[in-house]
Amino acid sequence: MKPALCLVAMGALVMDSSPQGSVGGATEVSGCTLGPLGSGRHPSHSATPAGPGDEVARGIAGEKFDIVKKWGINTYKCTKQLLSERFGRGSRTVDLELELQIELLRETKRKYESVLQLGRALTAHLYSLLQTQHALGDAFADLSQKSPELQEEFGYNAETQKLLCKNGETLLGAVNFFVSSINTLVTKTMEDTLMTVKQYEAARLEYDAYRTDLEELSLGPRDAATRGRLESAQATFQAHRDKYEKLRGDVAIKLKFLEENKIKVMHKQLLLFHNAVSAYFAGNQKQLEQTLQQFNIKLRPPGAEKPSWLEEQ
């Protein structure tokens, strides 16, 4: 005899009418025994009153639900506003002067990133040149000792390469300092201002989204229910407007300070770069060393086991 089959679907229990499928009116499903069909019996639950822990848990769950709900509503409104702007159906708040400054900052950052990349390439090339000159100087010195007939000529060239290496290390120190300062300006100072700009742009989108929502409600009927929604929308709009105005002011201040800091830093770094490169290619060792002293740049002492300027970068 086949065992009785039972299905649980939509809360209903369907049993085979075969008597072999039941024992004492009870049916076993996957190891769980169910009561007789139609018995009306349910699992008993203890009537234990909810404790303080349960109340706290329900309160936390309610707060999380409210946060998710607000986030969903805000995301929906902002997405709707963004699509409306892109398709030319929605209005957008524009501060022409501020947005021009922001676009100029982004363009300046791209150009400085290009200078930074070229400066790092120059550092790598100088380092390779120094390694070659050092090896060449050692080769000349070795040949000077082993070639009596050309000892003087090899000796001159060995000393020349040694001097070039010394000046090259000085120049490399100056260029590395220049690159490090540009890197700080681009990746920290400018990036910090652009992070505030992103917050401002997000606040602007929220402001316009809730402004549009308030305008649509204002055009509707003025019954009791609508008045309540209108007051709530007005309060929410005002909060987003205050946030937008604050961030707009923050961006304007940061842009001003960034411009002042950029001019100060670049004035110093461009002077350093010019003086160091000019002195190096003119063969003026004294002026090259004075340039590093002027900008408080310290080179590693000869023979010190420290990372090279390239490795530190």
Image (cartoon, rainbow, N blue to C red):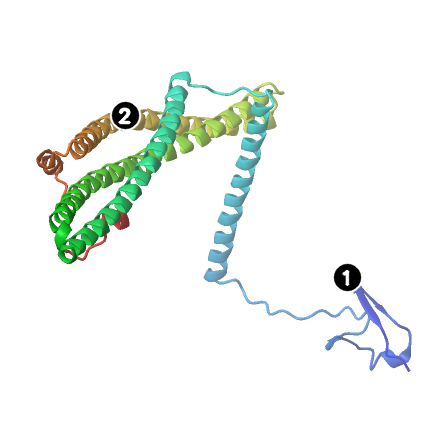
Question: Residue 302 location, x and y as percent?
Answer: 13, 52
151 or 114: nearer the eye? Answer: 151
Q: Secondary structure at mark 1?
A: loop
Whether tag 2 and tag 1 are in contact, CB under 8 A, the answer is no
Question: Residue 126 location, x and y as percent?
Answer: 26, 42
Residue 155 in view? yes
Residue type pointed to by label 2: Glu
10 or 101: nearer the eye? Answer: 101
Could you tell me which quadrant the N terminus lies in? bottom right
Residue 313 in view? no
Question: Residue 147 location, x and y as percent?
Answer: 16, 55
Give me the residue at 77% from left, 68% from top. Answer: 40
Residue designated by label 1? 11
Q: Secondary structure at mark 2?
A: helix
Residue 49 higher or lower than 33, as above or below: above
Give me the residue at 19% from left, 55% from top. Answer: 306
Does residue 255 appear to the left or right of 151 in the view shown?
right
Q: Residue furthest front?
A: 149
Give me the residue at 33% from left, 40% from top. Answer: 121
In the figure, residue 197 lies in which quadrant? top left
Whole-Å distance between the Cαs marked 2 and 1?
Answer: 70 Å
Among numbered discs 2 and 1, the one appearing first in the sequence = 1
120 or 168: nearer the eye? Answer: 168
Does residue 278 appear to the left or right of 57 in the view shown?
left
How many tags in the picture? 2
Residue designated by label 2? 259
Rate crowding at label 2 as few (under 14), some (14 to 19) or many (20 or more) other CA atoms within 10 Å.
few
Residue type pointed to by label 1: Gly
Give me the residue at 49% from left, 28% from top. Answer: 205
Question: Residue 72 location, x and y as percent?
Answer: 55, 40
Which circle marks residue 251 in the picture? Answer: none
